Amino acid sequence: RSARSAESILILRIQVAARACEVQSAIELLRNAGKVQLRLCMPILEAFATSGEACAAEKFYTEFVAPIWQEERANPPADSKDVDNRRVLWQKVLAARVRAWTAAVIAGTWSAEGDAYE
């Protein structure tokens, strides 16, 4: 139970930092969390989507989220309910990335050559 409480507090701290535009602080909290979990990444992706920072969102995705995707592809959950929950969470990841891309295109900060986050 205390591990769950600690994780809930960590999620809350990351959410507060991300919503306060302290994304780097939220990323540091995530780095210090031990095993990175997808639900811990969502507030940061949402912050990038809200601010239209597509380049930063893609760097964050590459460093933190893509390894989770690779792990889940190699070891899919056995429980069908968990599979459905994960699918919804992954849809939210994609939606946040698309919102960041859209905002960057509208603002004129997205590279048409596809090298915007290199």
Image (cartoon, helix red, strand yellow):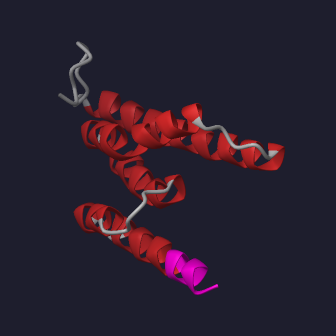
Name which quarter of the figure residue 22 lies in.
bottom left
**Is residue 18 positioned above or below 104 on the image?**
below
Q: How many marks?
A: 0
Rendered position, 117 above or below 68: above
The residue under the point 23% across, 12% down is 113
Near-viewer residue (90 or 7): 7
Q: Residue furthest left?
A: 118
Q: Position of residue 21 (x, y in %)?
A: 29, 65
Residue 2, magenta (yes or no)? yes
- Is 94 magenta? The answer is no
Q: Is residue 75 left or right of residue 57?
A: right
- Quarter holding the C terminus? top left
Tell me residue 56's x, y (percent): 26, 43
Q: Residue at x 30, y 62 (%)?
A: 31
68 versus 7 height, above or below: above
- Main secondary structure along the magenta-highlighted residues: helix
Nearer to us in this view, 101 or 94: 94
* Residue at x 48%, y 54% (from the top left corner): 42
Nearer to me, 30 or 110: 30
Find residue 25 and report its image quarter.
bottom left
Whole-percent x, y for residue 106 in the image:
33, 30
The residue furthest bottom is 2
Magenta stretch, residue numbers: 1-8
The residue shown at (50%, 39%) is 71
Could you tell me residue 34's position as x and y percent? 38, 65
- Can you say whether 1 is above or below 107 in the image? below
Q: Is residue 73 or residue 57 the one in the foreground?
A: 73
Locate residue 51 relative to residue 65 in the image: left or right. Answer: left
Check the image and name the residue furthest to the top: 113
Q: Quadrant of the N terminus?
A: bottom right
